[in-house]
Amino acid sequence: MPFFPAYVDHSDSNVVSVDWDKLTSTSIPAPFSFIVYFDTLRNIPTVGMQVTKFIQYLTEAGYVSGPENVHLLGHSLGAHISASTGSNIMMFTGKKIARITGLDVAGPFINLLEDKDRLTPVKAQFVDNVHSDILLFGTDKAVGTVDFYANGGAGFSQPKCLLLDVIFNFRSNAELFNPGLYL
């Protein structure tokens, strides 16, 4: 991800990326990937638990001093994985993780997830979201402590955003996120 260097350059941080591609529908070409979207939704709690176990390992091994020093960043369904992880950490430790950042938080059929696996403002001490596609793949709901709606959040009003580009070559604000702006 292009924003990894910004974290390392602007703070004393370690950056970990979770590759859950084998549990998602991204291996099927769009727009047909939507057919297996429900399988992807069902895997959110599983991935959230694995991330939780990894954070617990890092904490027990002394690499992280506690959940209050963890910032999770998730794009689309990854934002809900971050929420699931935040719920699990709270359940196991009684502490909230410091921050969750959601980029284009997924909206379609999220109501099928249990509340503990959906992004809400209570999943971390601070939850910030950037919405740039509320019309198709994202949600228009404010699901954070703070929610930003780039250009009103409507995907088709984003600079250089064309319908076919959105459907066949899904690009998002994950490409534009620069944590250096937030640190």
Image: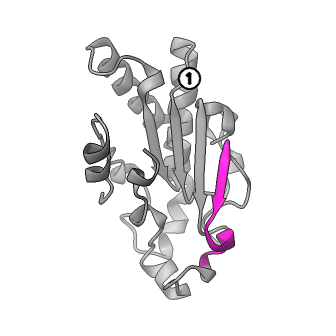
Q: Is residue 84 above or below residue 37?
A: above
Mark 1 burial class by Cα count in 10 Å: few <14, some 14-19, many 20+: many
**Residue at which label 1 appears:** 96
User: Total marks drawn?
Assistant: 1
Q: Could you tell whether 54 is left or right of 92 in the image? A: left
Pick the front one: 181 or 94: 181
Query: Which part of the image, by quadrant, shows the C terminus?
Result: top left
Q: Is residue 81 above or below residue 172?
A: above
Q: Is residue 153 magenta?
A: yes
Residue at x-position 51% and y-position 22% = 89
Q: Amino acid at mark 1?
A: Lys
Q: Position of residue 75 (x, y in %)?
A: 48, 54
Residue 130 picture quarter: bottom right
**Element at label 1:** loop
Residue at x-position 56% and y-position 37% = 83
Query: Which part of the image, by quadrant, shows the N terminus?
Result: bottom left
Q: Is residue 168 magenta?
A: no
Q: Position of residue 178 (x, y in %)?
A: 40, 57
Q: Position of residue 39 (x, y in %)?
A: 52, 51
> For the magenta stretch, what is the residue range?
145-155
Pick the front one: 175 or 85: 175
Residue 124 picture quarter: top right
Pick the front one: 92 or 62: 62
